[in-house]
Amino acid sequence: MKLSYIFAALSAVTSVLALPTLLEKRDNSTEPKKTILLSNDDGWQSTNIRAAYRELSDAGYDVIMVAPVSQRSGFGGQFKFPQTVNLTTDGEFGYPRAGAPSWAHEEDDVNIWYFNGTPAACVAFALDYLLPKYYNNKTIDLVVAGPNEGGNVSPGLFTLSGTMGATYTAVDRGLPAIAFSGYDLNYTFFKDFVGKENDEFFGPNINARLVVEFVNKLFASQKNNPLPFTTGLNVNFPDVGKECYDPEWVFTRMAGPYSDNAALKYNETTGLFKWNDIDLPATDECIFGDCDLPSEGAIIFKTKCKSSVSIFSIDFDASYQQANNFQKSFGDFFS
Ligand SMILES: *[C@@H]1O[C@H](CO)[C@@H](O)[C@H](O)[C@H]1NC(C)=O
Ligand SMILES: *[C@@H]1O[C@H](CO)[C@@H](O)[C@H](O)[C@H]1NC(C)=O
Ligand SMILES: *[C@@H]1O[C@H](CO)[C@@H](O)[C@H](O)[C@H]1NC(C)=O
Ligand SMILES: *[C@@H]1O[C@H](CO)[C@@H](O)[C@H](O)[C@H]1NC(C)=O
């Protein structure tokens, strides 16, 4: 698993700032549109989210993008929001600079917002502030988080990932939501790739095309609600752009073999810890869902050029039998 890569990407941030040549919105559709709230944890400057915004808009969706002003990978469902009216430090890649408002939209696109908060708080900012204030309480048909720069495979990353945090925050609020994660592990600034918009072999463009393909399929397949109430989807893409351009879709379950997460390893020389990946023994056990499905880990780590799609529930209760056995074991302790 590639938690390592997320953190490697975090430390690889450089501060490059080109002059704005913002992406155009090229949407000519006249049909009634579905509205998508788009967020991520890598930040509003990420090449992946800008490509997804462009491709979803081009595909005819109304997209409102709200993403953190800085890299917020690994923030899970943490709920942090601005404590000052203006930024006290630069945004990621110096975009924007300290002193800019703590939330704002692109000068030439009122639907691309940053917010100095965590992914979960970005979702709340959109729902609780932007929609009533600027969008006449527009209905959000779907929340999309990502595509993340780095995979979010297995329950180990469910709580840890900010991409997942945005997703389950939306599901908690009663909205259908999808987390998309890619294995394009470079954390990149979209302005460094101006001119690549039509390069169909460019990783972020492939990820964005896969997002559109999946979202189109979702809306075409479901009559009313894109997803059952209380559920969301976790979608992981393989490492696209080298030998893999058109991965096949595999329906998976979230838990199962090859689930992993971070553990600590003590280094005698430095006297400090490094984190390392471990398998998660408990998630091999299948309690809920279709136990015949392959796990996300089995698809993403053990096959080439396949995407995994898992449906999860935010009903965190243990199974009836587990709860019942536990309760009984306490005799008349509970009233
Ligand atoms: C925020 O920045 C604006 C623009 O520079 C400035 O006018 C305003 O006074 C600042 N607000 C605070 C609270 O610092
Ligand atoms: C939006 O919804 C909120 C909460 O229901 C309500 O107070 C507000 O008046 C609505 N605003 C508009 C523009 O309809
Ligand atoms: C990441 O960036 C480096 C340097 O630009 C490049 O060589 C490498 O192919 C990139 N990796 C991916 C996954 O795009
Ligand atoms: C401990 O850290 C040092 C210094 O970074 C490194 O050279 C060494 O390989 C590490 N040891 C292990 C067992 O990882």
Image (cartoon, rainbow, N blue to C red):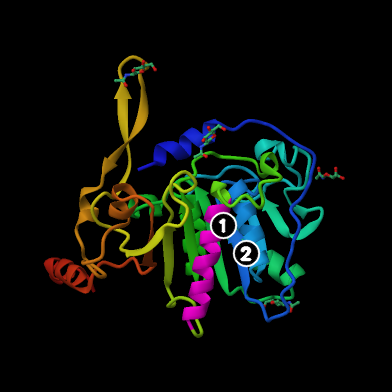
One can see residue 174 in this view: no
Residues at marks 2 and 1 touching, judged by CB atoms closer than 8 Å: yes
For residue 5, above or below residue 234: above
Question: Which residue is situated farthest in the top direction here?
Answer: 269
Q: Examine the structure image and report whether residue 216 is included in the region drawn in magenta.
A: yes
Which numbered disc covers residue 208?
1
Magenta residues? 205-222
Quarter residue 268 falls in: top left
- Give the percent coordinates (x, y) of residue 214: 49, 67
Quarter residue 228 falls in: bottom left
Which numbered disc covers residue 190?
none
- Gap between marks 2 and 1 measured at Cα: 8 Å
Residue with the mark numbered 2: 56
- Give the percent coordinates (x, y) of residue 328: 14, 71
* 181 and 333: which is toward the camera: 181
At horizontal 69% and vertical 75% (from top left) the residue drawn is 137
Q: Main secondary structure of the magenta part?
A: helix
- Give the percent coordinates (x, y) of residue 221: 47, 80
Label 2 environment density (alpha carbons within 10 Å; few <14, some 14–19, many ≥20):
many
Q: Examine the structure image and report whether residue 207 is included in the region drawn in magenta.
A: yes
One can see residue 228 in this view: yes
What amino acid does circle 1 point to? Ala
Quadrant of ligand 1: it is top right
